[in-house]
Amino acid sequence: MDSSASDDRGELEIRAIPARHPWRWAGAALVVLLAAMLVRSFLTNPRYEWDVVFSWLLARTIIRGLLLTLALTAVSMLAGILLGVLLAVMRGSPNRLLSGAAGSYIWFFRGTPLLVQLVFWFNLSALYPRIGLGIPFGGPEWASLDANALISPMTAAFLGLALNEAAYLAEIVRAGIVSVPAGQVQAAAALGLTRRKTMRRIVLPQAMRVIVPPTGNQTISMLKTSSLVSVLAIPELLYSAQIVYSRTFQTIPLLIVVSIWYLLLTSALTAVQGRIERRYGRYA
Amino acid sequence: MTLLRAERVFKNYGANEVLKGVDLEVTAGQVVCLLGPSGSGKSTFLRCINHLERIRSGRIWIDGELIGYRQAGDKLYELDENAISRQRAEVGMVFQDFNLFAHYTAAENVMAGPVLVRGEDRRRARDQAVGLLTRVGLADKLDAYPRQLSGGQQQRVAIARALAMRPKLMLFDEPTSALDPELVGEVLEVMRALADDGQTMIVVTHEVGFAREVADLVAFLDQGVILELGPPAEVLANPANPRTQAFLSKVL
Ligand SMILES: Nc1ncnc2c1ncn2[C@@H]1O[C@H](COP(=O)(O)OP(=O)(O)O)[C@@H](O)[C@H]1O
Ligand SMILES: [Mg+2]
């Protein structure tokens, strides 16, 4: 007899019990325990020196360093994006020389450590003592400058960060460009759009959906990576803190100050990134 | 009046000879259906007509203007990009895969040509787009994005997008081949209405019924040459060439 048809059992509720996951509970308990230990040490270990942390958090020199970090990130990122788009378009050129040049650039800058690049730019004057403007291969020179004066630590930092970033962004932009179906490019050409206009009005706006998320990640990463320029004695956030603790020996509290600021900034950027992503995902 | 003249068009991809001396003459207002087996060069020929492809030799004129090149003596020199784009703006093209701009709504797709190519005022272009989309039966889909439309609807938007440039000539490359069978009719209907309005068109298609009823001329392309050309009654009913016969017996 069919059980669903049996009327005498129709009233009975047959309950479904979900499977239990004891190991999940054990894992969660372990995490809670570790977190409690961590918090307790924060609160009880006097060597964190929280009072020192809070006294330096809004100190003038730290805030100045913070602003410099933000400026360096913004300017390098902007230059990196412009150069990155140029490299990405070159990379896709039918001209082998142009695409090869872009490919070599990307290969070089992704293949060497940023720290090495920064120190290299800083020492550029050892390689080219004078930098001039004129006609190459023995032509007249209109102006020339002492490389030592031209390449200040700030210039070296900007060059290092921006040129390196451009290589990564070129790959990101390239991936965005090739994500747009070739048929649309052909349709645009058939309508009478020039290649430039097709790139600007049809390809890049759609490529943004692919480009924006990793570019956001790059920006967040750049914010932190810019701390590398502390090796060039540029008073950005990290180096500003280092100047202080080399004098006061409050190394840990100042590193905490620095970390708090980086965390705040990266969290803010992450929020902004989410908003921008939603905006570019509209038509999808 | 001759609108399109193609004279001994040759085209190759490396060692692959795709077009081997194609001749075709289309009078203004005519509908020409281009039939032929897959790989015979139909798409390539259409793409040469608006210079999406370079040709090796031969000449193509639209309305008396040499397409893609400037002739000096016995040589053809390719035009610059702006001149080529200007010529393409006079020729509409509809693709098998619609190729609508995914980030634009239906109306914005139709406005793309007038606004981006001709620099027309957006408001006027929008009015025109509304008119054209109404004409293809999509007055209620103005603000829909392509992904929200069926294949048949997308193809009708694509036709409206091409018409927005008031093209002298419309090229259709298998416009119904990517559609589910029940959506083929609505697109053919729009094309038939266009033909009735006197639009000059070249249609690559496997829809023999459409060719028989709408075409003024049917051309059969095989291995890069036009084997047969004539009114549908002749070419479709009594093909002279055995290869045409074999092809038609397969698609009919
Ligand atoms: N971009 C291309 N590169 C190389 N070969 C191509 C290209 N486009 C088409 N072909 C070749 O040209 C021939 C004709 O193709 P096509 O014009 O697309 O034929 P049809 O549209 O009649 O099916 C085929 O052999 C095809 O492989
Ligand atoms: Mg084809």
Image (tube, coloured by chain):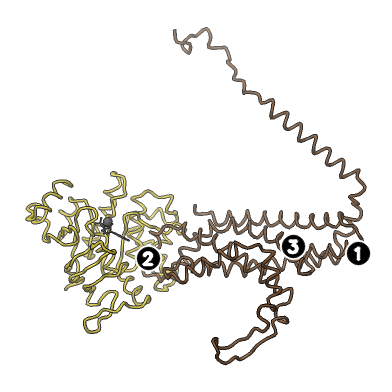
Chain colours: A brown, B yellow
Q: Position of residue B166 (x, y in %)?
A: 31, 69
Q: Nearer the viewer, residue A119 or B226?
A: A119
Q: Which residue is rendered at x = 57% and y = 12% of the image? A: A12
Image disc number at residue A247: 1
Tag 1 near tag 3, CB within 8 Å: no
Q: Tags 3 and 2 in contact by the CB under 8 Å rule?
A: no
Give the residue at mark 3.
A227
Q: Are marks 1 and 2 in contact (CB under 8 Å)?
A: no
Q: Position of residue B252 (x, y in %)?
A: 16, 46
Q: From mark 3 to mark 2, how far is it between C-alphas?
A: 56 Å
Question: Mark 1 belongs to which subunit?
Answer: A
Amino acid on which the number 3 mark rests in the picture: Ser
Label 2 Cα neighbours within 10 Å, binned few <14 / some 14-19 / many ≥20: some
Give the mark count.
3
Secondary structure under tag 1 reads helix
- Is residue B190 among the parts visible in the rendering? no
